[in-house]
Image (tube, rainbow, N blue to C red):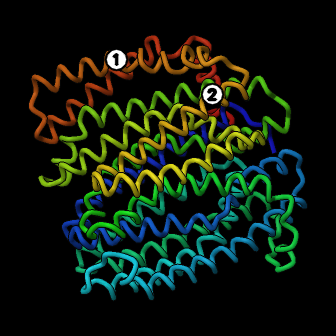
Amino acid sequence: MRATTWAKLLRNTFGQYLATGVSVLTGLALVPFTVRHIGLASFGLWALVNGLFGTMGLLDAGLAPTLTKKSAELLAKNDEVALSETASRILTLYFVAGGLAFIILCALAIFAREVFHVPSDSIHTFRLVLLIVALQLAVSFPFSTWSGIVAGLQDYHISSAIGVVVNLAKFILTVILLKLGFGLISLIWLGLAATCVGGLAYIIWVKHRLPSLLLKPSARYLNQIGELTRFSGSMFIWGVAGRVVMESDRIIIGVFLPMTSVGVYEIGLRICNYSRSVLYPVFTFLPAASDLSARNETERLQRLYLVGTKYFGLFYAFVACGLFLFGRQFINLWMGPGFDTSIVILFVLLIGNIYQSQNVVAHVLLPGMGRLRVFTWVMVAYPILNLTLSLIFIRAWGLIGVATATTATYFLAETVFMYFIARIFELKISKILMSCHLPIVAILIPAVVVSLYFRAIVAQQSWLGLSAGVALFSACFAGALFTYGVSGAERDRIRAAAAKLILRPA
């Protein structure tokens, strides 16, 4: 496989942004449409099931990033035989994980009345939904083997294309099903079908790129996974931290509060999660870090950290500031009145996400480089802090307390992590602040000031007024970015990478 290039990273990043953009837009369009057709209580039930689906991802046990890292390393060495062995081992483990997920969700379906605050008239629907999702998990885990190999190939443009097609198809079919009068169950079946179609597309692409690759799941691999343990163990802890922070809120609320509370929380959480889509392309750096680390290119890794931290932090700060400025108006226009609590939840979660965004590049680069000790300990702290604080704060402040617990977790864990990141990359904190944080603030200040003035003199209680405010904010941001936010050297590298991408795809 060819070495990592800036052109390849640019292609993958833009591809991921396209896919996440389509996902966000379709999701934003579907939420109010879905709530109107199935009701807030059923929407809360759907959100709870999505949280359970995400939590079952813990059974991945770090296998997905492990496969991405290992396949990138083995492809860099042109060792497809070893890749076949490694992927077959992970495929075997995925079959086991899928079976366990199926059993766990079936058990939850049986005891759903005792575990969750589900209304009596919805318990049958909830159980049926859990059974369908159990089947979806059972098939989605094995498919993850092929998506992991695609990531190792750094063919994220293919992953993006598959994601765009599947999301658009789900969007169209969801609208049709709800318009025809079908309810929540039809949406769950649609999710299962989308998982199968996407998985088959990954298999077809891997067969095209690596025709000699042969995967054979076998029970003998269950006794031969020792070499994967160290890295996948750390990735499992990473997965636990992410799942707990991103998914456990819904489950805790579903246990302690009525199902409508899950729906109210979901509105703020979903917009915040959509804002995090700006950060998702950072995962394209994992195979790149493995590739560069295998080639001992330490200077390029340090540069990748600084450039990535600056631009991913900048783009997330842009989105988050836009939501602080216009989020209240957007939710009022999007969902209608009655969601003031959702707005507060959104703002509280955004504060924590802004703080955490400064370290997301390091979260991906360190595992790719094999620097796992500090990373693992920070990830161990995440679920402990988040669950402890959530259980304490929900009793004191309800839904707002759950959001506050998540934000407090980000501040505590990431502050400690920042110190060790600087040591690992042999950088002073002041260097990171000057290279990454100060430019972000300098670029955003003009856009924020102009937008605050605009908001003070122009009514935005219409889609036209809101759109004008967002357009002005975006234009000021873009003007500052291209005027003084990009250095001459960075501009030259972007131009060169773009030219290679257009004239000779990497």
Q: Secondary structure at mark 2?
A: helix
Along the viewing direction, whichever of 496 and 275 lies nearer the viewer? 275
- Between the C-alphas of marks 1 and 2, the distance is 27 Å
Disc number for residue 445: 1
Which-is-in-front pick, marks 1 and 2? 2
Q: Residue at x 39, y 63 (%)?
A: 252
Q: Is residue 486 left or right of residue 33?
A: right
Kind of residue at badge 2:
Tyr
Label 2 Cα neighbours within 10 Å, binned few <14 / some 14-19 / many ≥20: few
Disc number for residue 419: 2
- Seen in the picture, residue 98 relative to 483 is either above or below; the reply is below
Identify the image quadrant of residue 424: top right
Q: Is residue 232 left or right of residue 495?
A: right
Along the viewing direction, whichever of 388 and 278 lies nearer the viewer? 388
Question: Quick check: marks 1 and 2 in contact, CB under 8 Å?
Answer: no
Q: Residue at x 45, y 72 (%)?
A: 191
Instruction: Point out residue 247 in the picture as x, y percentages from the top left corner.
Output: 45, 59
Disc number for residue 288: none
Q: Residue at x 16, y 48 (%)?
A: 333
Q: Of marks 1 and 2, which one's residue comes earlier in the chain?
A: 2
- Seen in the picture, residue 410 relative to 265 is either above or below; the reply is above
- Seen in the picture, residue 125 relative to 53 is either above or below; the reply is below
Kind of residue at badge 1:
Ile
Identify the image quadrant of residue 251: bottom left
Q: Residue at x 73, y 57 (%)?
A: 233
Label 1 Cα neighbours within 10 Å, binned few <14 / some 14-19 / many ≥20: some
Which quarter of the rendered picture does the C terminus lie within? top right
